[in-house]
């Protein structure tokens, strides 16, 4: 996950630093799939973890003007 996030940021940095502002260069990261493994004990902790995970995913996506799908 950190590597994927760093890659997307590095693409933006690459364009900003290595190309002239008047060069028509655009890099768009359009689709990503992220999978996670969750573990928590007791079951009440698992319920809270799942609820918060969904809220965090939607909140971060909203802050960036995109959507998140939590399955």
Image: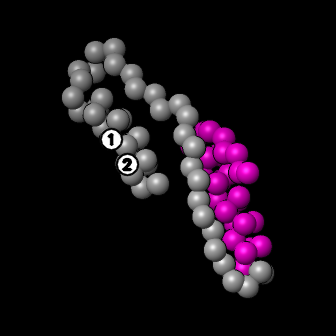
Q: Is residue 49 above or below residue 67?
A: below
Image location (x, y in percent) of residue 52: 70, 66
Q: Is residue 36 above or below residue 46?
A: above
Q: Nearer the viewer, residue 38 or 28?
A: 38
* Magenta-tinted stretch: 45-71
Q: Nearer the viewer, residue 11 or 65?
A: 11
Mark 1 = which residue? Answer: 10
Residue 13: image quadrant is top left
Mark 2 = which residue? Answer: 6
Q: Is residue 63 visible?
A: no
Q: Secondary structure at mark 1?
A: helix
Residue at the spot x=36%, y=35% of the render?
Answer: 12
Residue at the spot x=59%, y=59% of the render?
Answer: 36
Q: Mark 2 packing: few (<14 Cα in 10 Å), some, or many (20+)?
A: few
Image location (x, y in percent) of residue 59: 65, 53
Residue at the spot x=28%, y=34% of the render?
Answer: 14
Image location (x, y in percent) of residue 20: 23, 21
In this rendering, would 24 be left or right of 67?
A: left
Q: Is residue 59 magenta?
A: yes
Examine the residues drawn in magenta and state their main secondary structure. Answer: helix
Q: Is residue 34 above or below residue 25?
A: below
Residue at the spot x=67%, y=62% of the render?
Answer: 53
Q: Secondary structure at mark 2?
A: helix
Q: Is residue 34 magenta?
A: no
Q: Is residue 24 visible?
A: yes
Image location (x, y in percent) of residue 62: 64, 46
Q: Real-space Cα distance between discs 2 and 1? A: 6 Å
Callout 2 touching callout 1 (CB < 8 Å): yes
């Amino acid at each position: 996950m950190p590597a994927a996030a760093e890659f997307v940021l590095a693409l933006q940095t690459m364009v900003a630093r290595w190309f002239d502002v008047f060069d028509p260069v655009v890099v768009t990261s359009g689709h990503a799939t992220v999978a996670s493994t969750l573990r928590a004990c007791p079951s009440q902790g698992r319920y809270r973890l799942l609820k918060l995970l969904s809220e965090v995913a939607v909140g971060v996506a909203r802050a960036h003007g995109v959507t998140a799908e939590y399955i």
